[in-house]
Amino acid sequence: MMPQVCARCDETTSDPVVVAIGYGASAGGGTVYACPDCAPTFPKQRDPFEHSLPDRSDPVRQRR
């Protein structure tokens, strides 16, 4: 992976970790990177498609 700038400490890292994906309607999205030391300080990002997928554990929904 190419070196990236950490979103928390602004240092360049050769081992970037993806900590967020930005979504945008007109401009598209962007990837937010952090260095391995700062990555654990970012909150877990919510999956925007989590509730739009069918619940595979519900047998009633599987028959529809």
Image (spheres, rainbow, N blue to C red):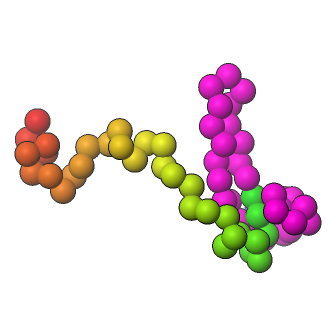
Q: Which residues are magenta?
A: 4-32
Q: In this orientation, does residue 40 appear?
A: yes
Is 31 in the magenta?
Answer: yes
Q: What residue is rendered at 71% in x and 42% in y?
A: 30
Please say if 19 is above or below 36: above
Of the 4 image quadrants, the one containing the C terminus is top left
User: Is residue 47 rendered to the left or right of residue 19?
Assistant: left
Q: What residue is rendered at 14% in x and 52% in y?
A: 58
Q: In the displayed orientation, state which residue is furthest to the top.
A: 26
Q: In this orientation, does residue 3 appear?
A: no
The picture places residue 43, in percent across and down from the top left corner, at 61, 62
Q: What residue is rendered at 86% in x and 59% in y?
A: 5
Is 6 in the magenta?
Answer: yes
The picture places residue 59, in percent across and down from the top left corner, at 9, 51
The picture places residue 47, in percent across and down from the top left corner, at 48, 49
The answer to which of 23 and 13 lies nearer the viewer is 23
Q: How many marks?
A: 0
